[in-house]
Amino acid sequence: MSLPDANPASPTPRAPAGVRPAPACTLVIFGAHGDLTKRLLMPALYNLAGSGLLDPAFRIIGVDHVASTTAQWRDGLTEMMQSFTHDPNAEFHAPSINATQWKWVCDRLDYVQADFGDLAQIRALGEKIDGNAIFYLAVSSRFFAPVIEILGRAGLVTETGGHFRRVVVEKPFGADLRSARELNRRILAVLQESQVYRIDHFLGKETVQNILAMRFGNLLFEPLWRNEFIDHVQITAAETIGVEQRGAFYEPTGALRDMIPNHLFQLFGMVAMEPPNSFSADTVRTSKEQLFEAVRPIPPTDAVRGQYAAGTVEGKPVIAYRDSPGVAADSTTETYVALKLHVDNWRWAGVPFYLRTGKSLGGRRTEVVVQFKKPPMMMFRDTETQDLPPNRIILNIQPAQGLTMEMGAKRPGPRMDLADVQVRFRYEDVFAQSPNVGYETLLYDCLMGDATLFQRADNIEAAWRAVDPVLQAWAGNGTGLEIYPAGATGPKGADELLERDGRKWYPLDGA
């Protein structure tokens, strides 16, 4: 299958003014036939090509055990790209595919059939690579260390002649503290830390990166960003979808491993880390590491887990998690988790951070709610403002993208009567937006050698260390697992986690 004929010259688009195109490089994708490659990496490369950020000598080599030719692989990718034009729910959705732009990508595709553990085949792959190279591991996590080790044995990750060799590792990075440490040990026995790019696509989202811009680019916020003024912080990643056909993956994983030490801890890091001296990669990642190290290990009493039963989400019936394909009938895997974190440092002492994530919930949103303490109300004691909600800053990640501020304002009229009002900034109202899957920035940064948005070994291990007591307490038993109906906001225990502190969750149908 092919798109309409494009200009055979397939010219390279020009980069925006002031933006430097990436250097010439060969991107080798292990797992070329996988879902990640088709749904996210290829659309991201298509977008980068259209932005003029890839060098004319850029090449893509797909590697997989599947018997295929370059033409067959290219045709399959083309068919997938075309399908995105009529799938509004796809992570990449565009009204049409630019034929010239896609041809630019297709002209640079090559496919190699290889067994990931066959040294001779990996050495033969190396004969196709000259100069700079990035090896992207879009494969199951069990292959991460073996692939890196065989690349090392084949001599493909040795940096010589001024050329770089880098490896991108997807999540999940370990399943607990012990396995994360072991994976780091095996990887760093082959590579230098500077060669390893542990990717978390959450950090590729503009709205996540905007947290740093908002905090450190505006004098308005930083003086208030401390325990003197902030009562607590909520970080939410709520999904309306269930596990669908991913039960076999989800069963040994669960919501905590799938979301907390990576996605939600990265949001937590952006919100709570100390101001770095610069935006250099190591400086930013050191600020995060210092924050994660200051997190008190979470006791099981500050953790809630739930699993969805049958119910209704957005007017559609949803089967119970235990009835999903690949899921055990007596499964104790959590599809919801809520945690309370304490940070033992000067800035955040006494300020709890509440994290929650779940599937088949009644609302879809990823957001950070920073709730401030209530002001002294003595001057308003004879008015009807004693129950006025506190000020909040809500960092909207998705589906709304931007920032919402909640504050009190006087209602018009002769009485001193305050109303809770919202001031909103939305990306789509201010900036022209193009289709984006969140991997564009991360791929470009990797090509440029900027590891700011990638996790370092100590970041990974510090996040696992914080949640490890909960994982150990939950291992192999269903104690404390609460069942909640699909379409609810989660289990009752999650509400009680905040209620015992005199607080409550920000509603999923809020800002």
Image (tube, rainbow, N blue to C red):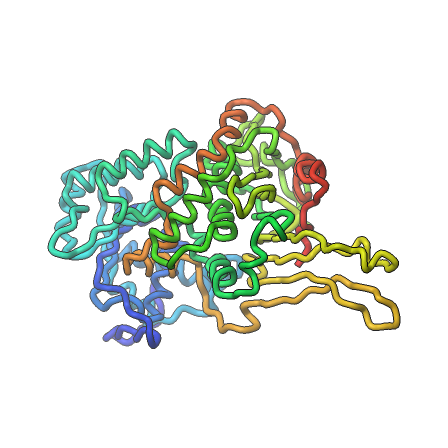
Q: Quadrant of the C terminus?
A: bottom right
Q: Where on the picture, by quarter, is residue 101? A: bottom left
Q: Is residue 356 above or below residue 444?
A: above
Q: Is residue 395 above or below residue 5?
A: above
Q: Where on the picture, by quarter, is residue 318? A: top right
| 131 vs 319, nearest the viewer | 131
Residue ID at (34%, 61%): 45
Image-based side of 2 in relation to 344, left or right: left
Residue ID at (68%, 57%): 391
Residue 229 x %, y %: 63, 53
Image-based side of 122 in relation to 492, left or right: left
Q: Where on the picture, by quarter, is residue 132? A: bottom left
The answer, for residue 336, to whether it is visible in the render is no
| 63 vs 131, nearest the viewer | 131
Q: Is residue 479 above or below residue 88?
A: above
Residue 387 x %, y %: 80, 53
